[in-house]
């Protein structure tokens, strides 16, 4: 990611201008269950969107085929080749090689994603962590445009994050800084998809909300009957099932949402105390599905953070679920 010296500190900085202003870049967002592609202009506008497509999470081969299909459908909408192609993926990534080092929710290790996608599309491909991509989108083109100190907390199937500090996007020693989904919030708590127990993600990630809901249904089938009817069977209950039932007044769904809010508040307070951002951006599919999470987080930060951190603004991502897509395209354009 291109960086620049900021000189004297101030509250805001002007983000680095794109390296190329002509043409469209292709951004691809690959999650644990879906893939989305879009053609993105230099100012962040999405000129064409593929729509959300689900994949079976059946290993690198099948998932990459779904990704390439989505990308080609998008590229068919323009006669000009893209100036750059970027993939945002829910994973720890080596940006030098475009290798997915570890993707817990995809079950991948050491997958050369950039090389394999480039072979299919016939053009160079850049790969970036999805939370880092969302941060780039909101910093360059969105809700935190120009801010010097921000944290983007991404709530989807998993929980991720990325930070801009002093006008610089932070990377970490192995390019994995910001993995706040694996902060321990419950000692000896639930098993995560990573090697740890009690992680933030193991309570607030979409997979974890679904898992907690299914356990509650099995413990009390009568209370869970509404969720099962809505989903079709216990195994199909998802976080979105819980949110829909909550809005319909289902008592068990209400309890699950309130529990999730408490865990989310615990994690968000820890993140804001640790990174001291001027702006906390909430992004990802769970925020889009439950915008009520934003005031819960804001109230917790005002009441529970250290005074030096408690003034952070809490905002929803301007690009909503498309933030990783826009950020991947921007990252690839600036890296070209």
Image: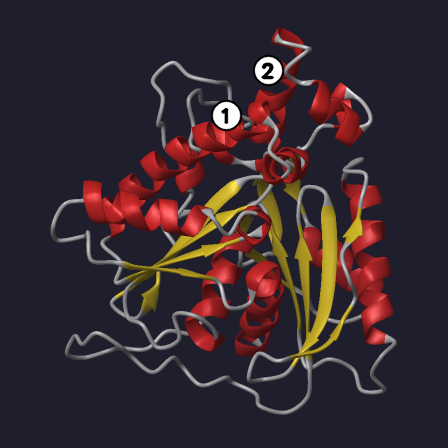
Relative to residue 80, is residue 256 depicted above or below?
above
Among the 4 quarters of the image, the one containing residue 35: bottom right
Q: Is residue 173 visible?
A: no
Q: In the orientation shown, which residue stands out farthest toward the top?
A: 219
Q: In the orientation shown, which residue stands out farthest toward the front?
A: 249
Q: Is residue 124 visible?
A: yes
At 57% from the left edge and 23% from the top edge, which residue is drawn? 252
Among the 4 quarters of the image, the one containing residue 83: bottom right
Q: 230 or 269: which is nearer to us?
A: 230
Relative to residue 9, is residue 305 depicted above or below?
above
Q: Which residue is mark 2?
A: 216
Position in image of residue 68 (x %, y %) = 82, 59
Q: 12 or 18: which is nearer to us?
A: 12
Dot label at residue 255: 1
At 76% from the left edge and 56% from the top edge, which residue is drawn? 52
Q: Disc count in the image?
A: 2
Q: Earlier in the sequence, mark 2 or mark 1?
A: 2
- Residues at circles 2 and 1 in contact by the CB criterion of under 8 Å: yes
Position in image of residue 134 (x %, y %) = 51, 61
């Amino acid at each position: 990611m291109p960086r620049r010296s900021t000189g004297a500190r101030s509250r805001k900085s002007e983000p680095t201008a794109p390296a190329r202003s002509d043409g469209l870049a292709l951004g691809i967002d690959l999650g644990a269950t879906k893939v989305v592609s879009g053609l993105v202009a230099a100012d962040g506008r999405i000129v064409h969107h593929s729509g959300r497509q689900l994949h079976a999470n059946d290993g690198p081969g099948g998932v990459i085929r779904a990704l390439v299909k989505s990308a080609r459908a998008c590229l068919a909408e323009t006669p000009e080749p893209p100036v750059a192609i970027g993939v945002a993926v829910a994973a720890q990534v080596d940006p030098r090689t475009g290798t997915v080092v570890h993707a817990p929710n995809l079950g991948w290790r050491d997958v050369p994603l950039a090389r394999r996608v480039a072979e299919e599309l016939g053009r160079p491909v850049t790969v970036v962590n999805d939370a880092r991509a969302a941060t780039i989108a909101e910093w360059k083109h969105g809700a935190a445009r120009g801010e010097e100190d921000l944290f983007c907390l991404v709530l989807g199937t998993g929980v991720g994050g990325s930070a801009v500090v002093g006008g610089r996007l932070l990377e970490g020693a192995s390019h994995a800084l910001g993995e706040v989904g694996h902060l321990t919030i419950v000692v000896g708590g639930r098993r995560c998809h990573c090697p740890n127990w009690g992680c933030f993600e193991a309570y607030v990630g979409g997979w974890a909300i679904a898992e907690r809901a299914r356990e509650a249904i099995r413990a009390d089938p009568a209370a869970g009957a509404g969720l099962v009817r809505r989903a079709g069977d216990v195994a199909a209950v998802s976080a979105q099932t819980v949110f829909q039932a909550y809005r319909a007044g289902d008592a068990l769904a209400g309890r699950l949402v309130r529990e999730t809010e408490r865990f989310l508040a615990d994690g968000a307070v820890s993140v804001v105390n640790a990174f001291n951002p001027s702006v906390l951006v909430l992004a990802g599919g769970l925020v889009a599905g439950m915008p009520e999470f934003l005031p819960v987080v804001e109230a917790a930060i005002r009441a529970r953070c250290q005074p030096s951190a408690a003034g952070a603004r809490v905002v929803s991502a301007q690009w909503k679920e498309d933030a990783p897509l826009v950020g991947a395209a921007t990252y690839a354009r600036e890296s070209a």
